[in-house]
Every structure is written in structure tokens, then in C-alpha cells.
Image (tube, rainbow, N blue to C red):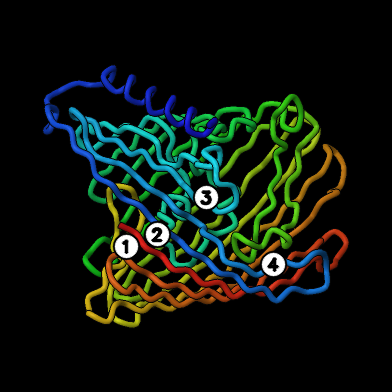
Amino acid sequence: MRSISHAAACAGLCLFCAPCFAGGDAAGEDSFTAELGGELHLDYSAFDNDDRGPNNTDGLDARRARLEVSGDFYGWGYSFEADFEGLQDDFSADVIEAKNFYVTREFGTSKLTIGQFIQNFSLDAKTSSNNGLLMERTMFGTTIAPLYRLGVGWIDARDHHTLGVGYYSLEQIDEWHTKGNALSARGTWTPLREDERVVHLGLSLAREWYDHPGVDGASALRVRPRPAGAQSDNSRAMLTDFSTGRDVDADKYSLEFAVTRGPLYVQSEYGGVRYDDGMQRNDLRSFYAAAGWLLTGETMPYDAKNGRFGKVKPQRKGGAWQLVLRYDRMTGRQHLDGQTDFLDVSTEARSIGVNWYANANIRLMVDWIESRNRDRFADRTLDRTRALTTRFQFVF
């Protein structure tokens, strides 16, 4: 019951804090609305493993099974979302996880958010998993970007730019073992924004303070991406490792670029982190480039309020078809102060995908991934894995 009690406590805190910030005569302050939504992502993965280490296992997985209640109450907005995918392995309330769990308040062109939500950092992280080009976010987006964190955020959105800042805990409602707190900021600019042509530029910065990782009940600070999809646990490589209990400072950044021109969409980010505990340092670098082509002529829509791209809307009865390519790479180098590197590892993935948007609610996805991990210090390949992954996606 820990997940439910933590989520309930967060919801209560959000509702308690809301009146403290109330002000003005916003529309709808005397009304209460509620709307039920949800998403289901059913994934199947088939692996072509090499003979290095244990094999990844083929199988069907409910990647996400979420229900959400959202709406407005007396001038405030809210969203409470729970993920039930854990019930496929353990049918108990303990495995139900809280995702979005927040309240919002608008002040002109600005919006305040209190609770648990995806922080202001990275285009890839801010793009909904329902709208991504491929089944999974990039390795940087899944391991470095602060996704669901407890905190306070503020974003101001104008015609051609947004500026968002936030203060958050490294903890989540259902994960209390990562200790510390952080600050983040993200700015975006669209020098060109027309119906079928958009140029997006962005910069994200974050400073995180980790408290005694690896001791006294705190989780170790490790970066181990899954290069061949969410089910490729046995293809993970260690890029960062801090587990001695010394406090760690992390400076994160990401440079964003995206452009649409009719049915063509291109997105890329270059980002990194510098971890430092006073005795050793780790420098992690990441780059990805992705492109999508809507064969049926639609255009990726732009969400100017959040500085991101939204859902493809099919214009024909037969739905919309999209071809996707992506190259994704991360490297991690770690050394004791004044000494040479003792860790120098890279991981990369090349992906090609096909998406069929049957209608506004249903999408079918097929991705082919080839991943490779290398120990650059020893000049040897650690793992090479190919994967064919498919998804049935239903969103309402």
C-alpha cells in the first residue's frame, strides 16, 4: 500500500497548497470538472543476441497501463495519473505507481505547477511517450533527464519562446531511495513558426545535489541505459558509478534542435553531465539525431505552450503512415582526481521504425534496433544486440 499512501499524501499536499497561491478572478473559479483518460502500450520484443553475457528474453510486456483523472477545480487545474503495468507481475496495490500527480494555476501567459511531473529539461523528455517517433525515448532521455520528480515548476510561454524553471527533489512518490534536490531551467525559441514549417531551438540546464549515494539507504548513482529497448536489461553497460557514500554534484545540459517542413520532421539533441564527488569525476556525453517522414502528407504539430511537438492527426480514413530513423549514442568516462580514466565506455543504437496512426486513439509501431556497447579503455566490444520491437498503443 506504500504507493497508494504516498500518492494520496501528494494529492492532499497539492490540494492544500493550491488555495495559498490563489488570486484574481480566473474563469471557472466556481466550477469543478473531471475527465477520465488513459493509455495502454502493449509491447513485444524479439532479440538476436550475441554470445557475450546473458541473453535478453523475447516476450510480451504491458509497457504502460495508465489511468488519469484531470480537470479544473475553482480556478486550478489538476492531473492525477496512476500506472498499473506492475500488476502483470505482482497483483497487489504495492506495484501501482503514481506518474503525473500535480495541480496547476495560470497567471496570464505563465503557469505554476506543484506536485510530481516531468521537469523542465530536454525536448525528448518533455515529449509525451504517446507522441514520440520511436517506442522508447533516447538513452539520454531515459537515464539523465529528470522525468517524474516532486517539485515546483514555473513556465512562461509567449508567441515564439518559452522559459521554464523548477526546483525539485530527486525523490519520487514511489521511489524514496534517491536522496537530494535540484534546480532546472529550460528555454525554447521558434524563429520560424508557420502551419507546416517550424524551427525549434532550445537549451536546458540543471544542477543536482545527490546525498550520500550508495550508503544509509540511498541508492547508488549509476547510469546504465537499455540500448535495445525497455526489455534489453542484459545489454546494459555501466557508464557512471558513484556508490561510496560521498555527496555528488551533477551539472547537466542539453542543446535542442528540431524542424518541420511539411511531412518531414528532424529532431536532435547534444547533452551531457559532469558528476563530481570531490575525489573522482565522471563526464558523460550524449548525442542523438532522428528524422521522420509522414508518407500520407500530415505535419507534426507544434505545442507552443510547452515548447514541444504533439500528436499526429490522420487526415485520411486509412490513417497516417510514418517512416522513422534514429542514431543514439552515449559515452561515459570516469577517473580519480589527478589520475587517468579507469572507466571509458560507449553505447550506441541505430533504429528504423514504421508507425501507423490508425486514428486519433490507436497507433501501431514496429522498430528495428541494432545496439553495441564498447569498452574503449580496453578496446573491445562488450555486447551487440539486435531487436525487433512492436507496440499496440491505445490512448483515450
Q: Which residue is at 35% across, 77% downward?
A: 294
Q: CA distance from mark 3 to mark 4?
A: 33 Å
Q: Callout 4: few (<14), some (14-19), or many (20+) C-alpha neighbours within 10 Å?
A: some
Mark 4 or mark 3, which is nearer the start of the sequence?
4
Of the residues tagged 3 and 4, which is closer to the observer? 4
Horizontal and vertical percent for residue 338? 85, 39
Q: SS at mark 1?
A: loop
Q: SS at mark 3?
A: strand
Viewed as shown, does residue 267 lie left or right of 74?
A: right
Residue under numbered circle 4: 57
**Residue kind at label 3, given as amino acid type:** Ser
**Residue kind at label 4, given as amino acid type:** Thr
Mark 2 or mark 3, which is nearer the start of the sequence?
2
Q: Is residue 269 above or below residue 300?
A: above
Q: Are marks 1 and 2 in contact (CB under 8 Å)?
A: yes
Q: CA distance from mark 1 to mark 3?
A: 23 Å
Of the residues tagged 1 and 3, which is closer to the observer? 1
Mark 4 or mark 1, which is nearer the start of the sequence?
4
Residue under numbered circle 1: 311
Q: CA distance from mark 1 to mark 2?
A: 8 Å
Mark 3 or mark 1, which is nearer the start of the sequence?
3
Of the residues tagged 3 and 2, which is closer to the observer? 2
Viewed as shown, does residue 144 lie left or right of 115?
A: right
Q: Is residue 111 above or below residue 269?
A: above
Of 199 and 265, nearer the camera is 265
Please, which residue is most extreme toward the front here? 91
Residue under numbered circle 2: 130
Of 199 and 125, nearer the camera is 125
| Residue 271 seen | no
Mark 4 or mark 2, which is nearer the start of the sequence?
4
Residue 254: mark in rendering: 3
